[in-house]
Amino acid sequence: MRDYIVLYLNGERRKLRGKEVFMTLSDYLRSHLLTGTKVVCEEGDCGACTVMKGDLVSNKLDYKTINSCITFMHLLDCSHIVTVEGLSKASGARKVQDSMVECHGAQCGFCTPGIVMSLVDMAQAADKKITEKKVKNCLAGNLCRCTGYDSIIKAGTNIDFNSVKNFSSQFAEDQIIKDFSVESKNSIEIEFGENKFYAPVKLSDVIKLNQQKEMLVKSSATDLGVQINKERLFPKSRVSLSQVKSLYEISQNEDFIIVGAKVSLTILQDYVEEIIPEFYELLKIFASPQIKNAATLVGNIANASPIGDTIPFLMVSQSELELTGPNGKRRVNINDFYTGYKQMDMSQDELITNVFIRKPVKNEVLKLYKVSKRKDLDISCVTAGFRLKLKDESNVIESVDIALGGVGATVLKMQDSEHALLGKDYKLEEFEKTGALASKSIAPMSDVRGSEEYRRILVRNMYTKFYLDSSVIFKQSELQAGASHES
């Protein structure tokens, strides 16, 4: 057991106790005169506070961008943080800064350090083929208030990325890795006034702590960080899952992809690209790279938002949740999990430890939709998931699953729509009729993202859109089958 956290900052070892353990990373940096990291929104939206975080993966440090304004120091144990000031120690990375200067990509300067860090992240990737689209995707989590995007994108595409060296060759990583390998074997318990922080290495110890009243268990806190920053949440006792190595595992068997509670959305996105490409495409626009590098699938589920982007997919795929508590483990279908607004079939002393995503079966069509005011980094207005299969060599609907988000107190499994379509001929009229009925049965609200009427129209149109999209897929499958038969 240790009463401190250990991290490296721009290659230098830091050992933290007391008040600093409970600070946000951005506040810690600025209090230590590393003011290149800017704080603007404190919500993880603008990217001005972007830094690089290196985690120990397979005996090497894997660096990804994160938002420092919603990341707490106690979640950074055994991490190496590189800020914009640290690039002076990584000579190759300075070429990114040079390109921003040469292309006039810096204007007022608030967004510039975060943009540089995001471009450095892209430059360190294995794929050195840089396109304008890749630069735009890389910067999806960085806002420029001076609207200097053209110059910034030009700066990104003009970088000689082959000359940008990885951080592994710039810092004394062998020593850092050796240090982390030793320290990560010990659980953490820190107290400062009324604040308490625990990071056990055993899941059983997390479960014991979770039985205590008002104990807040955190995975990455991308949403909780915003609530704490905006003084909507005042946790005094916090537990981190970061030291429980088994929760970082992602694997698959014949029927399921099994996702641990600490698997980031970035890792999940890469994992499902070939297995469930439709889910991969949704995750691409789920949030910014900085958010996905920290956020988890379990966090999105446990947040229980009526517009959680992944939930419609999990519902239509009949995915299951593994809940672990003092009485052991149990599995529950996610369609039976939400019982009301922010209410779940999970006792206070249980945690979601794994998600079992059911893999697609042959000849079924899966389509996922997200409607929001902008494509990237935006909260959804309406989300939808459709999964359908036709009977062999017929035009009859054999199975159908439909789920909608943003139209009620929870994400809704549209059982009436499913029953209305099951066994019917696969025709546009059936989907138009069912969509019209569905738009009347939901209970959407009006807010800044869309009016009640707008949401009803969206739902009706989504049924039509799914028919049109799926009919194209079925026709392509028929053509491919015909071509295969002829050959």
Image: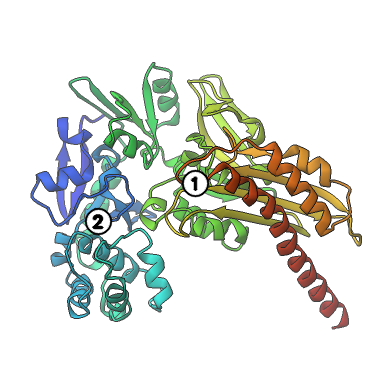
Sequence-wise, the earlier of marks 1 and 2 is 2
Residue 139: which quarter of the image?
A: bottom left
Amino acid found under the numbered disc labelled 2: Ala
Could you tell me which residue is drawn at 62 percent across and 54 percent down?
368
Is any part of residue 253 visible from this angle? no
Could you tell me which residue is drawn at 62 percent across and 58 percent down?
276
Amino acid found under the numbered disc labelled 1: Glu
| Residue 480 image position (x, y, % from top left) | 79, 75
Residue 147 or residue 236, whichever sits in front: 147
**Which quadrant is the N terminus positioned in?**
top left
From the viewer's perspective, tell me whether residue 131 is left or right of residue 347. Answer: left
* Mark 1 surroundings within 10 Å by alpha-carbon count, few (fewer than 14), some (14 through 19), many (20 or more): few
| Residue 396 image position (x, y, % from top left) | 89, 54
Could you tell me which residue is drawn at 59 percent across and 56 percent down?
279
At numbered mark 1, what does the secondary structure look like: helix, strand or loop?
loop
**Which quadrant is the C terminus positioned in?**
bottom right
From the viewer's perspective, tell me whether residue 151 is left or right of residue 261. Answer: left
| Residue 91 image position (x, y, % from top left) | 17, 72
| Residue 186 image position (x, y, % from top left) | 30, 34
* Mark 2 surroundings within 10 Å by alpha-carbon count, few (fewer than 14), some (14 through 19), many (20 or more): many
Residue 3 or residue 352, whichever sits in front: 352
Q: Nearer the viewer, mark 1 or mark 2?
A: 2
Judging by the rendered image, the residue that carries numbered circle 2 is: 48
Q: CA distance from mark 1 to mark 2?
A: 31 Å
At numbered mark 2, what does the secondary structure look like: helix, strand or loop?
loop
Q: How is the image coloured?
A: rainbow
Residue 120 sits above or below residue 6 on the image? below
From the viewer's perspective, tell me whether residue 41 is left or right of residue 266. Answer: left
Residue 31 or residue 448, whichever sits in front: 448
Judging by the rendered image, the residue that carries numbered circle 1 is: 249
